[in-house]
Amino acid sequence: EKIMQVHNTTTIRHGLVVVGQPFAGKSTAITTLADALTSAIGSRSLKTVLSWINPKALTLGQLYGENDASLEWHDGILSHIFRNASTGTQSDAKWIILDGPVDAVWVESMNTVLDDNRKLCLLNGDMIPMGEGMRMLFEVQDLRCASPATVSRCGMVYMD
């Protein structure tokens, strides 16, 4: 039932928050659905590619990107994955999963991705458009630190 809720939400929203306690089955639901979608496509050789990031384990620069001492821009992990996903094979589904506590420091920069703009805006001025098959998933224990602006832009699935 929860896997179907995740599936239904990903078909109508490009941002999804899966909320639940540790070991509630959040990662399992996401992985099982991705595997099922890849299998269901069969001979068309389309797949669902998952990229997992723990945003709280990284600095903002490591996550989004930053200028080095010579003012040369270097993409962070999220911007690198996002850029590659947006320019890769458009037929594949690409899900970027941010697994960890929501923090206003890093999540507010996701608002332009989650709203109708569907673009990741970086500090160097780059705006990376979200590809058609891309989805942003947040795997969290609670939404205590999430702003109403972020929550209102996402579909929700509660794992109990």
Image (cartoon, helix red, strand yellow):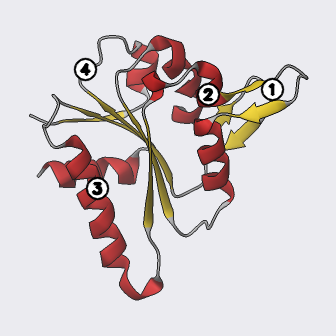
Between discs 1 and 3, the one toward the N terminus: 3
Count of numbered badges drawn on the protein: 4
Is 108 situated above or below 37?
above
Between discs 2 and 1, the one toward the N terminus: 2
- Residue 106 image point, x, y percent: 52, 19
Q: CA distance from mark 2 to mark 4?
A: 24 Å
- The crowding category of the residue bearing disc 1, from other C-alpha atoms within 10 Å (few below 14, some 14 to 19, many at least 20), is few
Q: Which residue is mark 3?
A: 31
Kind of residue indicated by mark 3: Thr
Is 124 situated above or below 5?
above
Kind of residue indicated by mark 4: Asp
Between 127 and 118, the one nearer to me in the picture:
127
Q: Residue at x 44, y 70 (%)?
A: 47
Q: Which residue is mark 1?
A: 124
Where on the picture, by quarter, is residue 22?
Answer: top left
Q: Which residue is mark 4?
A: 142
- Can you name the residue that lies furthest to the right here? 70
**Which element is circle 3 on?**
helix
Q: CA distance from mark 1 to mark 3?
A: 33 Å
Between discs 4 and 3, the one toward the N terminus: 3
